[in-house]
């Protein structure tokens, strides 16, 4: 009986195929062929879809949404459209649930912003203890120190990288979009960007989509070596500034002590922690820096009911528009691997830089080593 049934089903399948009825595999082909990598999709800020990612891949559906407004804003917002405009108006990616590890939640990360108005979660006053906004010919960038526990990260998380790529090209977070008004009237989609979070440091670089090297300045394959090597900057705790600056070397390109320009290849995780680095990154030259008080980045926020630790004020508090104006002057691969980043070895290399992601590792010690160099390259 079963033999007859099997034969009948086979005959029906053959008949269907002969008549042009698609098989299961054939039915899936158009959907798979229709997939477009997130970094190849272009959106208008005023006509965003509910979700930029509509795939049903191995990682499931997009966690949050991209249409964000006053109805979505608040501590439970799952907005996945981030903004970077100026020192006092930017967002970074953080976990949606408390006590989370970036490596486990990068696909679900949500936007945390410095001020209301973007339909996101709001970074608590006092969480950011130092920040620098940099505008260069090729990108804008915000870097600094943060009490990461206040944006749902575990205090000791070494962190990882968010970017619009990922192993499946759906982005981390899935469907995560970034926009800015720094390059003209209205919001422009930032196609290439990267955001590193961990060890109470952060950096978000947004590369100008009109630039010829956006993908290279916002490289996404060096997820194990953190902010200092991908987005070199001053990283001064207690200071808030907005500057013009020169563009850095492409991430992974460095000049050795012998003057030879080389390209770094990040080793695979299978080889274990990164124990050495062949160079110490130096921040690009900066100029026209304006320093603000810590309160400048929280304009529009209500006063917190519980006092947070804040940095000392360095100047009077500017209006949001003043900070934005100062920041807008124009000067003459893979999926994040946060777990490997956090477990990178702290062994020092020949230059004395431990290869660990965070303030206690690659960035922190490197920052200390080149502190004097900052003064040499910066024109304040």
Image (cartoon, grey):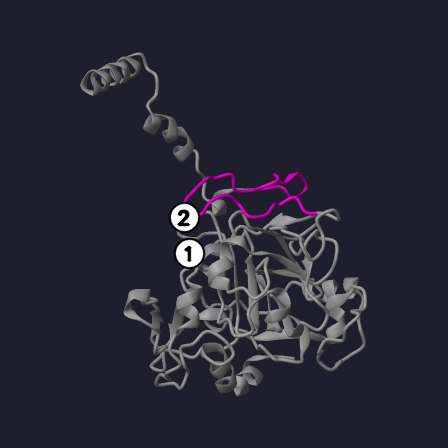
To which residue does mark 2 refer? Answer: 168
Give the SS element for disc 1.
loop
Chain part drawn in magenta: 43-68
Using the numbered discs, state the Cα–Cα distance from disc 2 to disc 1 in whole angstroms: 8 Å
Residue 65 vs residue 195, the one in the foreground:
65
Q: Which mark is residue 20?
A: none
Residue 24 vs residue 372, the one in the foreground:
24
Pointer 2 with pointer 1, Cβ within 8 A: yes
Query: Residue 7 appears at what percent x and percent y?
Result: 20, 17
Give the SS element for disc 2.
loop
Q: Is residue 262 left or right of residue 107?
A: left
Viewer can see residue 345:
yes
2 or 1: tag closer to the N-terminus = 2
Image quadrant in which the N terminus is located: top left
Total marks drawn? 2
To which residue does mark 1 refer? Answer: 335
Toward which corner of the image does residue 45 lie, by quadrant?
top right
Query: Residue 66 appears at what percent x and percent y?
Result: 62, 45
Q: Please say whether residue 293 is one of the residues in the magenta stretch.
A: no
Residue at 44% x, 65% y is 338
Viewer can see residue 332:
no
């Amino acid at each position: 009986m079963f033999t007859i049934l099997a034969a009948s089903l086979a005959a029906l399948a053959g008949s269907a195929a002969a008549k042009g009825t698609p098989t299961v595999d054939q039915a899936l082909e158009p959907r798979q062929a229709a997939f477009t990598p997130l970094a190849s999709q272009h959106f208008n800020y005023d006509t965003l879809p509910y979700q930029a990612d509509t795939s049903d891949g191995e990682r499931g559906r997009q966690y949050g949404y991209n249409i964000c407004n006053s109805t979505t804003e608040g501590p439970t917002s799952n907005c996945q459209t981030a903004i970077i405009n100026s020192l006092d108006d930017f967002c970074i990616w953080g976990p949606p649930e408390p006590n989370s590890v970036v490596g486990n939640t990068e696909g679900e990360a949500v936007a945390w912003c410095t001020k209301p108005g973007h339909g996101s979660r709001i970074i608590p006053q006092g969480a950011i203890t130092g920040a620098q906004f940099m505008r260069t010919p090729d990108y804008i960038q915000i870097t600094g120190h943060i009490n990461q526990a206040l944006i749902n990260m575990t205090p000791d998380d070494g962190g990882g990288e968010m970017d619009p790529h990922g192993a499946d090209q759906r982005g981390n977070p899935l469907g995560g979009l970034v926009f800015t008004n720094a390059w003209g009237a209205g919001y422009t989609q930032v196609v290439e960007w990267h955001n590193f979070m961990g060890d109470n440091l952060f950096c978000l670089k947004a590369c100008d989509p009109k630039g010829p090297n956006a993908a290279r300045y916002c490289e996404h394959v060096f997820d194990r070596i953190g902010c200092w090597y991908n987005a070199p900057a001053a990283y001064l705790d207690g200071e808030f500034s907005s500057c013009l600056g020169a563009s850095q070397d492409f991430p992974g390109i460095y000049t050795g002590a012998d003057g030879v320009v080389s390209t770094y290849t990040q080793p695979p995780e299978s080889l274990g922690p990164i124990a050495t680095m062949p160079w110490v990154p130096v921040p690009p030259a900066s100029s026209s820096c304006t320093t603000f008080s810590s309160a400048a980045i929280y304009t529009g926020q209500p006063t917190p009911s519980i006092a947070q630790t804040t940095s000392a004020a360095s100047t009077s508090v500017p209006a949001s528009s003043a900070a934005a104006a100062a920041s807008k002057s124009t000067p003459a691969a893979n999926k994040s691997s946060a777990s490997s980043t956090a477990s990178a070895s702290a062994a020092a290399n020949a230059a004395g830089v431990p290869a660990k992601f965070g303030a206690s590792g690659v960035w922190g010690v490197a920052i200390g080593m080149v502190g004097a160099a900052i003064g040499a390259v910066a024109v304040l």
